[in-house]
Image: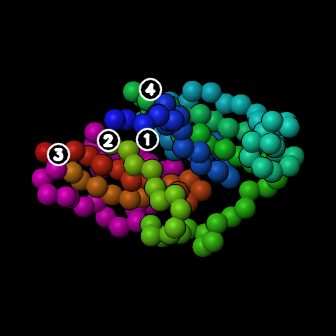
Amino acid sequence: MLGTMTIQRMDNVAIVVDDLDAAVAFFTELGMELENKAQIEGIWADQTVGLDGIRSEIAMMRIPDGHGKVELTKYHAPAAIGAEPENPPPNTLGLHRVMFAVDDIDDTIARLRPHGAELLGEVAQYENIFRLCYLRGPAGIIVALAEQIG
């Protein structure tokens, strides 16, 4: 017997960035599409987030299949607070990483490098199934890539 369903879908994952244009360029190069940009402010935003005087700009990036989104957020007020340490390692508590399936992992890495992407380790192969890597993207987030090979 199934219980009452409370979740209909996952709408998006939000990432706070310091350079919205650079983050949009990074995720566009990865293959996402800019769905829209918006200014966010007002009492409803303050009430939702639990901060006073919010002024932010968001860019909603859509996965090409239309099912997943990443919301990139630039806070103008109150100012964003940096994480400690600045570039936390993959075993840090909290949001770990965002993973994307890609057609060609080597090409994807090469296209993202001019946008500041840095490999955390190296491209590894898991059996004859996947090639995988972690790289650091905008605002220090960790983006994982997976290329199915088998």
Q: Secondary structure beneath disc 4?
A: loop
Q: Could you tell me the amino acid type at mark 4?
A: Gly
**Which residue is labeled 1 in the image?**
30
Task: Choose the circle earlier in sequence order: 2 or 4.
Answer: 4
* Mark 1 Cα-neighbour bin, 10 Å: few <14, some 14–19, many ≥20: some
User: Is disc 1 in contact with disc 4, using a CB cutoff of under 8 Å?
Assistant: no
Compared across the picture, whether 88 is left or right of 20 comes to left
Q: Which mark is residue 66?
A: 4
Residue at the (85%, 36%) spot, across then down: 42
Q: Could you tell me the amino acid type at mark 3?
A: Ile
How far separated are the C-alphas under marks 2 and 1? 9 Å
Q: Residue furthest front?
A: 1
Q: Secondary structure beneath disc 1?
A: helix
Task: Choose the circle earlier in sequence order: 2 or 1.
Answer: 1
Q: Is residue 146 magenta?
A: no
User: Is disc 2 in contact with disc 4, using a CB cutoff of under 8 Å?
Assistant: no
**Which residue is labeled 3 in the image?**
149
Task: Choose the circle earlier in sequence order: 1 or 4.
Answer: 1
Query: x and y percent of residue 68 in the render?
Result: 46, 34
Task: Choose the circle earlier in sequence order: 1 or 3.
Answer: 1
Q: In front: mark 3 or mark 4?
A: 4
